[in-house]
Structures are given as C-alpha cells and as structure tokens.
Image (tube, rainbow, N blue to C red):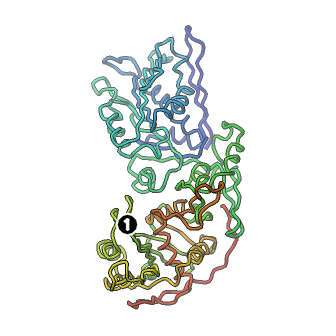
Amino acid sequence: MPRKTKTYVIEDEKASEIRIDYVPEPTLYSFHESDALVRGIMGPMGSGSSSALMVEMLKKAIAQKPLTRGRYKGERATRWAVVRDTYPLLRDTTLSDFLDWVPIRQTEIYGSKITQSPPYRATLILPMPDGHRVNAEFTFLAMSDAEDVEKLRSRAVTGVCFNEACPGIRRDHLKMAVGRAGRFPHPQDGGPSWRGVIMDTNAPDIESWWYQMFEIDKPERYECFKQPPAVLHIPGKDKNDPGTYVPNIGQGPYPMAENVQHVDCGFEYYMRQIPGNSDAWIRVFLMNQYGTIARGQPVYPMFQDCHWTSKDIPPMRGLPLIIGCDFGRTPCFVFCQVTPRGQLRIIDEVTSGYKESTAPMRMGIRTLARDYMRPHLRNYYGGMNALIVADPMGRHADEITDEMTCINELQRLGFNAIPARTQSLEARIGAVERFLTTMIDGDPGLICSQKAKATLSGFLGGYHYADKRGASEGETRAQPEQNRCAHPHSALQYATMHIEGGSTHLSGSGGGAGLQAARKVVRKPRLAW
C-alpha cells in the first residue's frame, strides 16, 4: 500500500503558518481509513502507534461537521477522554506524545490552553479555512482498577483514546467507553458526525481481554491492526542452537518493519535490545507476537508462531484422543491427537485452580473428572476413543484415600487410564522438543490450538525456568517454576511420551480402538519463513 501524506496548514494574519506533516505507515494508514467503532493497533516498540492515536484524534476533530445550533453553533466541537493506567505514565509519555502532534501551544492566541497539574485538561481552538473553527476538549484520565470505570460513567464524550491499553486497562473500562462515546455533542445541537474508541498496545498475553476480543469474540465493527515485527528469528540447526535475530527488512512472510526511519539509530534501536532480554520478551516487544512475559528462560525457546493457531483445531473423529493428566492440588487434562502424517495436535484442555481455568476453584481429581472432564468428553468428543496417560505418581494411594489411587479413581469413573512410563523431567521435555524441532512436509511437527489456553500460554513463556535468587544474571533453577502453566505442560509431556513411544493400541483397562502408528518423519532444518 502506498504511503500517504496528510498536511494540515493553518494560515492567519495573527500567527505564522502552523504545519503538521504526518506520513502514516501502511498499517497505520489502514487504521486511519477504517470506520470501525472500536479500533486497536498492536505493534512492537517504536512502531509509531501512539503518534497515530494522537493524529487520529486531531484528524477526527477537524473532520467533525459544524454544529447548526446550541452553544457550539458554527464550531466543529468534540470532547475526548485520553486514558493511561497511571498518572506518571500519563504525564511523562501520553501527554508528551499528545503535545508533539496536537498544536495546543502553537494556537494559544486563539484560546487553546492546557493545565499543568492533574487532572490534565487541554482545549484546542483551531480556525479553519472555511470560516468554522475546531473546538476540541481533551481530559486525561488514569484508569487501572475496577472502580475507575466511574471516571467515564457520567462523561459525555465524542471519543475515547486508550494509550498502551494492555495490561493496565480493563475490559470493563472499554465497555463503558463504548457506551459513552458519541454522547457529545448533544443530538439537539446536531450530534457528532463520528464517534468511537481508539487504542494501542504491545502484544499482550493470550489470556488478555484484547486477545479474547480481537481473536476469539470478534464483535462487529471492532478491528485490530497488527504491525509487522521489527526483528525476525532465524532458528538454530538443533535444540542446543538458540538461533539468531535479524532486522525485518521484508525478507520473510511479513512486510518490512514500520516506522524504523523515525526511531533513533534505525534498526540498531531494536538490535541493541536483544542482548540481555529473554526470548519471551523479544517475542512480545520486538516481534509483535502474543506472549507471556516472565522472569527466567522459557522451557521451549524453539516454539514459534508457526506452532500455534488462534483458531480451534477440530478433532479427527477417526483417530483416538491421547489425553495427558497431571494430579496434585490443581489437576488438569490436555487433549492431543497425532495425525497419520505424524503431526502432534494439542486441541483442548480441562484445567482447574486458576481464574481462567475450566474450573476456577481448586478441587481433587475425583471432582474434576466427574463434574467437568466427563461432561466435556461427552459434549465435544462423544463417540471417540480416548486414553488418559497420567502422572505415574498417581499410582500412590495417599492422594485420595489409603485404598484408592488417583489412577484407580479415573478407572472407577469409567476412563481408560494408564500411568506414564516415567516421571523423568528430561525424558518428558525431550519428547515435546522432538515434535517442536521436526518439520513434516513443510509443516511444523507440533501445533497448539488457542482452545488450550494455559498450555499455549506456557509455550509462549509462562512455562519457564525461574531465575535463582542471588545468582548471577541469567542463571536459572534446574526445575521449571510451578505456576499455572506447569501443570498442563506436565500433562502434555505424559501424553507426548506415550505418542513418541510409537504405541499401536489404546492400552489400559478399557481397551478401545487401535491407535494408528505415526508415520516416521525426517527432521529438516527449520526456517523462520
């Protein structure tokens, strides 16, 4: 898409020419041209998204139709709420970007003004060549807690701007903003010719409201504009080779990185941030990929965009389910299938003990299996054969009663359940790595559905080796951190070891249909594109 230039020129005998030159990058040009009610920009650091928000407010203020009656008769009147999660960030970043683009200080002779203490307020008075003048009011608000929604509840505004919406802004704030946008000017005075909500963010977590809204729910007239990554990752030749990062000059499947010519030192700005930062951090802030930022090294640094999909993966009805199971205080199940070509597909999960889990409360394996797992299998996978491969520690009799083991309990409830062959962490992680580092006819050897949220979040950095306290920089513990992502990944590892073992049948207490042996695959060098 060709890059466009928009120049606003104000000529008046009282003032020198005020000129605002703005050249939007291709993604930002599409953002400006969209008529969606809610528009979001997701981009890497330094991509120009904040500037785009400020110019968009100016653009919409200038484009408003002049009012025909009322207090603002003959004016292009708008009101805006500009939101950031804290007042220090609002003052030091958002307000600074705002004054770079909206000519408040250049038009003070017409009545433009801005307060110098919170709550910050600005008024732009801007005469236009057609004789009408722009009268735009901006109120800057800090919002992060649930009760902060009250700051918008009684406001009549034309539009709302959320700067750096994730992780500080809540979805409740957005819902209120949508309800308040378009309430000014009043319909009796002619009403607004445009209304809406604009916002930007770096790539958030897949469990964020942003991901849920733009990737899953996709409401009508909601649109997300994703900018290209600033850098690309070239994988190494094997699992011990971490690979390397290179500037995105358009040599891969993505368009060239945007706004590079306007950041300090160009691509060097991005490349100098790579040393000392984790792959998960680079994925989010430089590659513009959904991810989880955590201290420590990810267990699977070779996991890339090609290994997951934002869509559900439908089950292959002719093949059985291999379901990994982890016990403990937050038991869980991870649903896998292996295709006839040998690709491992992670299609679903049933988890417990965390806010975003299938069962948010903590519970034992009996309750989770009886009240959640069994109905889930019946409703979504009815008629399919399934084998549960469980934590071998579940053979011990002290997790439920002195007489009943966890695996016995699953069998008593009618599940075909067996223990995994080993609990060795090295064997478990190695089984998953072998699928991650395999290509099958040009496709990845492993793919994870967004439906398996906690598992996917773990791949994106949530499942990691925590930094050692008091250790030198980069030194991590030998065991992955036991967080909400660790349990689903343990379950996945048990299932993967069973599949990797080349089992040809659904062994266990319940029999079942035969499991097609995965086709032998040849490891090929992986490419970044």
Pick the front one: 301 or 108: 301
Q: Residue 365: percent from the left, percent from the top?
A: 35, 75
Q: Amino acid at mark 1?
A: Ser
Q: Residue 56: percent from the left, percent from the top?
A: 50, 33
Image quarter (top left, top right, bottom left or bottom right) of the C terminus: bottom right
Direction left: furthest residue: 188
Q: Is residue 342 left or right of residue 272?
A: left
Pick the front one: 440 or 2: 440
The secondary element bearing badge 1 is classed as loop
Q: What residue sits right under mark 1 in the picture?
A: 352
Q: Residue 59: percent from the left, percent from the top?
A: 49, 29
Vertical placement of residue 97 versus 354, above or below: above
Do we see residue 350 in this rendering? Answer: no
Direction top: furthest residue: 13
- Which residue is at a point 56% across and 60% down the rendered structure image? 466
Vertical placement of residue 21 versus 311, above or below: above
Do we see residue 30 in this rendering? Answer: yes
Image quarter (top left, top right, bottom left or bottom right) of the N terminus: top right
Q: Is residue 50 left or right of residue 508?
A: right
Vertical placement of residue 139 versus 18, above or below: below
Vertical placement of residue 136 versus 485, above or below: above
Specify few, some or many for label 1: CA neighbours under 10 Å numbering under 14, 14-19, or 20 or more: many
Q: Residue 106: percent from the left, percent from the top?
A: 55, 17
- Which residue is at a point 56% across and 66% down the rendered structure image? 307
